[in-house]
Amino acid sequence: MSARRAPWLLGTPLIDTRPRPFLRYTRAAMPGLLAAYPWMENHIDARSTRTIAWLRWLGFVIHEAKPYGALGRPFHKFSIGAPVV
């Protein structure tokens, strides 16, 4: 069985200065990531609308927001792929 991986990205304001190369690179990287890690999921703060749109654009499924974490704020689980049995 395949282990679940939790993708995480720390951004920088420089992404906003050249968004197209960032978008092209991240989309081009997805097939390689999925080949290495066919099941990825994590959680994203529901207020992070730009990031949610980017994740959806990359092919992630955005699940319904639910309370999560110590403060119980609304977070979406996001996922792509499926466990390999």
Image (cartoon, helix red, strand yellow):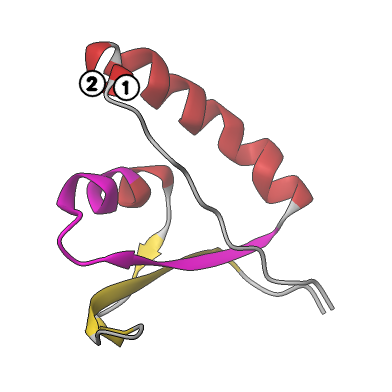
For mark 1, does the 10 Å Cα neighbourhood hold few (<14), some (14 to 19), or many (20 or more) residues?
A: few
Q: Amino acid at mark 2?
A: Asp
Q: Amino acid at mark 1?
A: Ile
* Residue range highlighted in magenta: 38-54
- Residue depicted at 68% across the width and 71% down the height: 4
Viewer-closest of 23 and 67: 67
Q: Name the quadrant of the N terminus.
A: bottom right
Tell me the quarter of the picture where residue 29 sits: top right
Dot 2 lies on which element? helix
| Disc number for residue 16 | 2
Label 1 to label 2: alpha-carbon separation: 4 Å
Task: Kindly give the residue lying farthest to the front in the view shown.
Answer: 70
Q: Is residue 19 left or right of residue 7?
A: left
Q: Residue at x 32, y 52 (%)?
A: 56
> Where is residue 62 drawn, in percent x and y?
32, 67
Is 35 part of what is drawn in magenta? no
Q: Which mark is residue 15?
A: 1
- The image shows residue 68 at horizontal and vertical percentages of 32, 84
Placement of 61 over or under 35, stated as above or below: below
Q: Is the C-beta separation of discs 1 and 2 under 8 Å?
A: yes
At x 82% / y 79%, what residue is drawn?
85
The part of the image, by quadrant, that contains residue 24 is: top left
Marking on residue 82: none
Q: Looking at the image, which is closer to me, 58 or 46? A: 46
Place of residue 69 in the rendered image (x, y in percent of width and height, measured from the top left): 36, 83
Residue 43 on the magenta span: yes
Residue 82 drawn above or below residue 59: below
Dot 1: element = helix
